[in-house]
Image (cartoon, grey):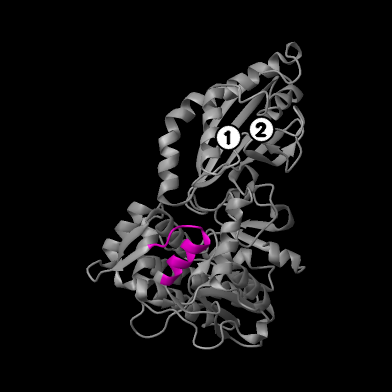
Amino acid sequence: MPQLLAAGHEVVCLARTPSKLSDRPWTGDVEIVTCDVTDADQVDEALRRCDAAYYLVHSMGDPADFAQVDRLAAENFRSAAARHGLQRIIYLGGLGSGSNLSKHLASRQEVGVVLADGPTPVTELRAAVVIGSGSVSFEMLRYLTEVLPAMVTPRWVDTKCQPIAIRDVLATLVAALDDAPGSHVHEIGGPTQVSYKEMMRAYARVAGLPRRLIVPVPVLTPRLSSLWIGLVTPLPVGVARPLVDSLRNEVTVSGEPIPARFGIDPMPLEDAIERALSSDVTLDIPSRWSDASSSPARVFAGDPDWAGGTLFVDRKEVLSSAPAADLYWAFARIGGSVGYYTQNWAWQLRGFIDTLVGGVGLRRGRRHPEEVRVHDTVDFWRVADVQPNESLQLSAEMKLPGDAWLEWRIEEEGSQRRLIQTAYFRPRGLFGRLYWYSLLPAHGLIFGRMAARIAETAEHRHEVAPSQG
């Protein structure tokens, strides 16, 4: 949507559940129409005012036969496009060739055939693994590589594929609006062909993980593999199973990675992975998704729960009669000589341990005892975002097996204010997950009391001397 809007197009967005789009920053710039593509009447009404249409639909995970559902949906779309004289349909499908395609890949290509079996010209873009948050194939790669330092895998880890950055997919989709007359099938991919094993090791390098030990064995069937993936990752088994079955098929581009007519230089694999992971280290966490501008690798609030990797959250809420300005004052003065409102000895111990392992510890203190600005240091934190009298977000700079943030927000609630304190942790590898779970008892003792003490201090602000806890 953002790319189409930036190109100056008027856009109609079809959605079965429009409420899922409520947090997207572009919803006010498009027309949103309730539409289930398996309902011919709804599709006909939705396409009535369109000149061209993107078909970005699949039914994997549907309790019914997904190939049959996809066939029906494509037929409805093709018929509506013909009735209203659309100039082009652009469809994103899947790579693969030969007569032994998996059910998933065969269905993807059948949809392209169904759409093209009408008078409307169709541009079909066939891609393999899309590297970007929210792509199911990428999320499967992410979770397997993050969680398992060593893995016994099926033989499909040696199958060749040609992953492509989501940035390049989106740019190609937009460029395809001006494709040459007639129907075309374009294979698109990144600049290199790699095995799934090589792709996992590339992810580990970019994510700063130790080299993964991968041992292929011939006994793991696609069914067993999908159950194993369902155990290790949060991906739905109904989605993972057809994807895993497809991994036996080589999915590579037979010609140039992206046709020259589209004018796109494909991004190398490790650059694409780094871009996909960049949102994890730039504070692109749930509390800020709705405020962020669009990025081709960014996770949005409407995406599935499993998109964007693992994010652990500890949230505490306290109702307070204190004015918003006083609540903000109370949490904005945290650290330094004030300390952390509760169990200061534990924070000092954490700072001492951080110093022992080469971290900054608590030595940096604060620039000002009560004022904060973006990029200020606060002990072993750095101010990532601050909205006076509304919110403060700190990014951890202590030595950690992952990335951490601590945030406070104020929400009006009748005659009172709600203080929302949230700790976020995005683990790195298996050790990161063990680290979080090992600290849960300490979090239970510290974070709840911290929020309550902040609210209490705010309510007695004018009794507290400056810079004193």
Can residue 38 be seen here? The reply is: no
- Left or right placement of residue 88 versus residue 235 in this view: right
* Image side of residue 382 versus residue 268, left or right: right
> In what element is the residue under mark 1?
strand
Is residue 401 at least partly visible in the picture?
yes
Q: Residue 201: image x %, image y %? A: 44, 66
Q: Which amino acid does label 1 sit on?
A: Thr
State the residue in front, 281 or 168. 281
Q: Nearer the viewer, residue 284 or 363?
A: 363
The quadrant the N terminus occupies is: bottom right
**Residue 178 image point, x, y percent:** 69, 81
Residue at image mark 1: 422
The part of the image, by quadrant, that contains residue 190 is: bottom right
Instruction: Say whether marks 1 and 2 touch (CB < 8 Å).
Output: yes
Type of secondary structure dominating the magenta stretch: helix
User: Mark 2 — residue?
Assistant: 409
Residue 240 % position (x, y): 38, 61
Q: As rendered, which of 412 and 314 lies closer to the eye?
A: 314
